[in-house]
């Protein structure tokens, strides 16, 4: 079976506009009032960053020109795709709220068909709902935003590689169009809205390659695809933000971990950092220092090598914590925030 596997031999995934998959319904409107609540600026707190969304500033965590990775801690097998998909979806919908709908795509989403966190109905509900201080949109406004989203559902790793190639071609055409518009109008190129490329489950799709062949083969095809994404992020650094949503989880399964109890030797210090021992791979969680390694296998190590800024989502004393565990192109290492608190 290993000889029959070819990353580039599968049929390419066809792009589908998210709004075309929605069932028509009667006109409804669910607009929430804008919140006046503000949060004091804290350099360590990620909350300000995810509220601002994709930025052009080099100091921002979520920005163009880099590859962002979202991973969960592999603590329980019952965690759903919604668990890891909620923050990237929030960043996406915030971005869609802020754009002026146009004929060109504002976001491309490559995802396994079974991943529901970016399903059209889910995105529509998110756009219509108020969340984390962001107001909701009317149904008509939300659908106009979904007109700018292209979904590319995939079945396997070769499909995902083909889909990334199609997005690359589309980005090249968008850049050419924008450059021509800039020359014609003498406008500032920075006035163009950012474009998001979200790739879901590359790690899980690679596991299928490993099962059909071996870990070395899986690492090879994953490395080639990550290099393609890195090239895209650099070529389109002024307007493209790439987000990898990893579904397998980091670390190893440990049934003794309890999300309601902080591991021995750790203490949450709001605004500070927890004491921890340096690990072999140099990347670790400030809240879970008893985990021997976040990347115990070749697949996880390979995946992390293709990520510029890696964010980890985990549960600490009933709260969902997101923290920056790696930032090789910026100064955000160690920033964290409480996403949800029970």
Image: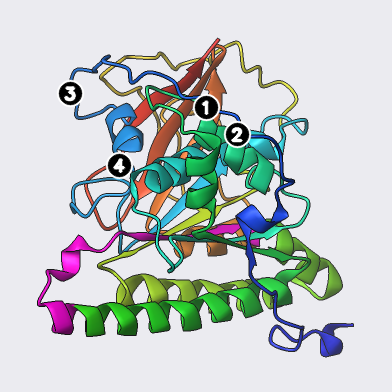
| Span colored in magenta | 182-202
Looking at the image, do the residues carrying marks 2 and 4 touch, with CB atoms under 8 Å apart? no
Q: In the image, which disc is placed on residue 129? A: 1
Measured along the vertical axis of the image, is residue 52 above or below residue 272? Answer: below
Q: Nearer the viewer, mark 3 or mark 2?
A: 2
Q: Is residue 293 at all visible to an observer of this figure? A: no
- Classed neighbour count for the residue bearing mark 2: other residues with Cα under 10 Å, few (<14), some (14–19), many (≥20): some
Measure how far apart labels 1 and 3 are at the Cα level: 25 Å
> Callout 4: few (<14), some (14-19), or many (20+) C-alpha neighbours within 10 Å?
some
Q: Is residue 202 left or right of residue 93?
A: right
Give the class, few, some or many, for how many residues have Cα within 10 Å of label 1's Cα (few <14, many ≥20).
some
Residue under numbered circle 2: 125
Quarter of the rendering occupied by the N terminus: bottom right
Task: State the separation of the CA atoms marked 4 and 1.
Answer: 31 Å
Quick one: SS at disc 4? loop
Picture disc at residue 333: 4
**Upstream in sequence: badge 4 or badge 1:** 1
Please state if 294 lies on the left or on the right of 196 as rendered: right
Query: Which of pointers 1 and 3 lies earlier in the amino acid sequence?
Result: 3
Determine the image quadrant of residue 332: top left
Q: Earlier in the sequence, mark 3 or mark 4?
A: 3
- The numbered disc on residue 41 is 3
C-alpha separation, residue under disc 2 versus residue under disc 1: 6 Å
């Amino acid at each position: 079976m290993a000889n029959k596997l070819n990353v580039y031999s599968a049929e390419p995934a066809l792009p589908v506009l998210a709004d075309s998959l929605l069932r028509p319904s009667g006109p409804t409107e669910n607009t929430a009032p804008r919140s006046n609540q503000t949060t004091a600026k804290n350099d360590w707190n990620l909350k300000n960053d995810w509220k601002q969304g994709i930025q052009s500033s080099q100091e921002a965590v979520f920005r163009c020109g880099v590859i962002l990775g979202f991973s969960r801690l592999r603590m329980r097998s019952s965690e759903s795709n919604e668990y890891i998909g909620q923050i990237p979806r929030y960043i996406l919908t915030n971005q869609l709220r802020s754009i002026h709908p146009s004929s060109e795509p504002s976001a491309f989403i490559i995802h396994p068909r079974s991943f529901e966190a970016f399903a059209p109905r889910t995105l529509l509900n998110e756009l219509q709902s108020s969340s984390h201080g962001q107001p909701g949109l009317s149904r008509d406004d939300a659908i106009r935003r979904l007109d700018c989203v292209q979904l590319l559902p995939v079945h396997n790793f070769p499909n995902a590689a083909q889909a990334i190639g199609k997005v690359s071609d589309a980005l090249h055409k968008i850049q050419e169009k924008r450059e021509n518009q800039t020359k014609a109008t003498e406008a500032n190129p920075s006035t163009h809205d950012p474009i998001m490329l979200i790739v879901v489950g590359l790690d899980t799709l690679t596991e299928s390659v490993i099962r059909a062949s071996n870990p070395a083969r899986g690492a090879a095809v994953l490395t080639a695809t990550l290099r393609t994404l890195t090239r895209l992020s650099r070529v389109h650094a002024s307007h493209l933000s790439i987000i990898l949503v990893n579904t397998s989880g980091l670390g190893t399964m440990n049934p003794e971990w309890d999300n309601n109890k902080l591991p021995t030797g750790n203490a949450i210090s709001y605004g500070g950092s927890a004491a921890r021992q340096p690990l072999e791979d140099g990347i670790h969680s400030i809240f879970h220092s008893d985990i021997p390694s976040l990347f115990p296998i070749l697949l996880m190590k390979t995946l992390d090598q293709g990520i510029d800024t890696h964010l980890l989502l985990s549960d600490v004393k009933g709260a969902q914590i997101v923290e920056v565990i790696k930032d090789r192109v910026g100064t955000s290492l160690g920033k964290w925030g409480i996403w949800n608190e029970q």
